[in-house]
Amino acid sequence: MVSTFTKTKFKISFAYSIIFFLFFIGINPINAQENLSADEMLIKARKLAFDDKNYLAAIALTKKALLKSPDYTDVEIFLGRLYTFSGKADSARVTFIEAMRKNPSYEDTYLAYGNLENWNNQSIKALEIVDKGLDYHSKSESLLILKAKILKSLNRYPEANLVLVQTLKFYPKSTEARSLSQSVAYSSAKNTINVGYNQTNFDKQFDDPWHLGSISYGRQTKLGSIIARYNYANRFKKNGSQFEVDLYPKISQIFYAYLSGGYSNTIGVFPEYRTGFSLYGKLPKSFEAEIGFRTLSFDETTVIYTASVGKYYKNYWFNLRTYLTPSSNSISQSFSLHVRYYTGGQDDYLSFGIGTGISPDNQRNNIQFDLRNPYKLKSNNVSFGYNKSIKQTNLISLNFSYENQEYLPQTRGNQFAIGLGLSKIF
C-alpha cells in the first residue's frame, strides 16, 4: 500500500505542476510578444488599430516596437498617427518632431505632421511643415496635394491653383489633383465674363440655320457662385431674347446645389419659362452624384427629371446622365455619356459626347420640346469639343455636334452645329 507520506508528496508535486503550467501559459504570450520583431509588432499594431479600433492597445504595442528599434521612423510615424486618431494632438506633435530630428528628410513625417495641424485648424503651421517637406521632396505628389488643400482652406486660391498646375505637370494622371483643381477653380474665380455663339444647320427639317448668342457675368460669393445670362436667338426667321440666372449654393463640404430660372417674352424662339434644380453630392473615390429636375413652359409646362453620376479617373472625367419625361401613359428616357481627356489644367481638355434624345439643358435645341409631342422624339447625337486656357485667366472653347433626328414619322433629318466661346476670369 502507498503510504500517507507518499500520497501527500504526490499531491504537492501535482499542485506545483498545475501552478507551473498556469504560470507558463500565462507568461508565454508575453514572452512571445516580447520576441516579436519591430516589423511584426507594427503589423499587429495596425491590426489592433484599423480592424479592432483598439487604439490604446495599438499605442502600447507600437511603443514597445519603438523601444526595440528606436530609429525605425515608420514605427515612430505610426505612433504619431495613432495619437492623432486618438485626439492626443500634443503627444502626436512631440512624436513627429522627434521623428523629424532623427530623420529630417523622411517624406511621410511631413505628410503625417502636416495633416495633423491641418485637421486641427492650424493651417499656417501645417503649411510651414509641408513646405519643409517639399524642400527635400519637391515633386512629392502627396505633399503638393496637401499644400493645395491647405492653401484652399486659407482662401489663397491663386496659390493653390499654381500648386495644382505644377502637380498635374508632374502627375497628369492624378485623379485627386484633378478633382481638387476643379474645386479650387470654382472657389477662386471671383468674376467671369463669357460670350458665346452657336449656329445650327439642317439638311431637311428647316431651310434656314438657327443662330444663338449669349453673354454672361458670373460672380463668386461666400454662399456660392451666381451667373446672370442674356441669350439672343434667331429661329424660324424670328428673333427672340431670354434672361437667365443660375445659382450654385454651397450646402456643406459634401453637398452643393444648382438653381436656375429663365424668362422670355418671345415664346417659340425660347420657352416662356424654364427652371432647374439639382443636388450634387461628392462621393468617395472621386465620384459625384446628382439628382434633380427641369421644367420648360410653352403653352403647357413639361417636367423633366434628371440624374447623373460622374467619376475622375487619371486624365479622364466620365459623366453618365439620364433624362426622364413622364407622360400619362409612358416615360420617355434619354441618355448621354460625356468624356473629357485633360491635357493640362482643369480648363484644358478634349471632350466627347454621345447620347439619345434632347436635353432640356441644351439651349441650342431644347426649343424642340415645343414642336411636337416630346415623348415621341427619337434622335441620336455625338459631339466633340476643345477647351484651352491661356495664361489661366482666358479661356477659349470650340465644339461641334451632329444629330440625327426623326422629326416626322419615318422621316429623319440631320443637324450640324458649331459653337465658339470666350471667357475672361478676373
Image (cartoon, rainbow, N blue to C red):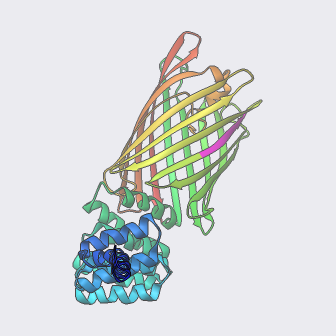
Magenta segment boundaries in residue numbering: 291-297
Q: Quadrant of residue 149?
A: bottom left
The correct choice, above or below, for 161 with respect to 405 in the image is below
Q: Is residue 232 left or right of residue 15?
A: right
Residue 235 point in image, percent of width and height = 60, 30
Q: Tell me the residue at 72%/20% (across/down).
A: 329
Q: Is residue 243 left or right of residue 362?
A: right
Query: As drawn, which residue projects farthest toward the front?
Result: 1
Q: Nearer the viewer, residue 97 or 283?
A: 97
Residue 382 point in image, percent of width and height = 43, 30
Q: Main secondary structure of the magenta part?
A: strand
Q: Nearer the viewer, residue 104 or 15?
A: 15
Q: Nearer the viewer, residue 104 or 424?
A: 104
Q: Tell me the residue at 31%/60% (across/down).
A: 168
How many labels were placed on the picture?
A: 0
Asked if the magenta segment contains residue 363, the reply would be no
Q: Is residue 144 visible?
A: no
Q: Quadrant of the N terminus?
A: bottom left
Q: Quadrant of residue 132?
A: bottom left
Q: Is residue 264 left or right of residue 190?
A: right
Q: Tell me the residue at 39%/45% (across/down).
A: 340
Q: Is residue 347 visible?
A: yes
Residue 421 point in image, percent of width and height = 46, 47
